[in-house]
Amino acid sequence: MPKKKVLVLCTGNSCRSIMAEALINHDLGEQWEAFSAGVEPAGRVNPRAIQVLRELDLDTSLLRSKSVDEFLDRDDLDLVVTVCDNAHETCPIFPRPVRQIHMPFEDPYRYTNAPDEIALAKYRETRDKIRTQLLPLLRNFI
């Protein structure tokens, strides 16, 4: 059975959607192939997001910040998940109808300049919420 394909969208594609992409591909890789993008891509992945993914021994080598424009012509997406309100409100129209789900998560980016113990705790919290809330939804997706 072919894998389902999911695109995870946020504003900058530097943190939440990146973490979701890595977690989905790691935990649900038999069932799903995940991609991520931003409606206003930051152009780089947040180093703290990479750090908290590596704490779980996830491969981060192929993660990069990209624009949703790279995915608009695809006709093989089964699902689009927006993980922030801005991406939900500005999500483009895909040429082929694709199911969309909105599941917002707090943006840990605002803690980037906080001391490590505070910032990393917020990044871990967001990572863990993605894992415990989004992944079960995908696991049971029909």
Image: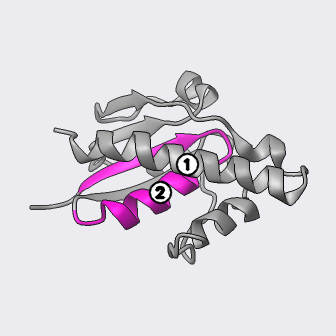
Question: Does the magenta portion include 6?
Answer: yes
> Residue 48 location in percent, x, y?
73, 61
The image quarter containing residue 46 is bottom right
Question: Taking the image as drawn, is residue 83 in sight?
Answer: yes
Left or right, 117 with reference to 101: right
Q: Which mark is residue 35?
A: none
Between 52 and 101, which is closer to the camera in this rendering? 52
SS at circle 2: helix
Between 103 and 89, which is closer to the camera in this rendering? 103
- Asked if marks 1 and 2 touch (Cβ < 8 Å), the reply is yes
Q: Is 50 located above or below residue 133 in the figure? A: below
Looking at the rendered structure, the number of numbered marks drawn on it comes to 2
> Residue 34 location in percent, x, y?
39, 56
* Residue at (50% x, 72% y) in the render: 58
The image quarter containing residue 100 is top left
* Crowd class of label 1 (few under 14; some 14 to 19; many from 20; radius 10 Å): many
The quadrant of the picture occupied by the N terminus is bottom left
Under mark 1, the amino acid is Ser
Q: Is 39 located above or below residue 26 in the figure? A: above
Q: Is 15 located above or below residue 56 in the figure? A: above
Question: Does the magenta portion include 69?
Answer: no
The quadrant of the picture occupied by the C terminus is top left
> Residue 118 location in percent, x, y?
82, 50
Left or right, 79 with reference to 115: left
The Cα–Cα distance between marks 1 and 2, rounded to whole angstroms, is 6 Å
Query: What residue does disc 2 label?
Result: 21
Query: What residue does disc 1 label?
Result: 17
Region in magenta = 4-30
* Residue at (30% x, 52% y) in the render: 5
Under mark 2, the amino acid is Glu
* Crowd class of label 2 (few under 14; some 14 to 19; many from 20; radius 10 Å): many
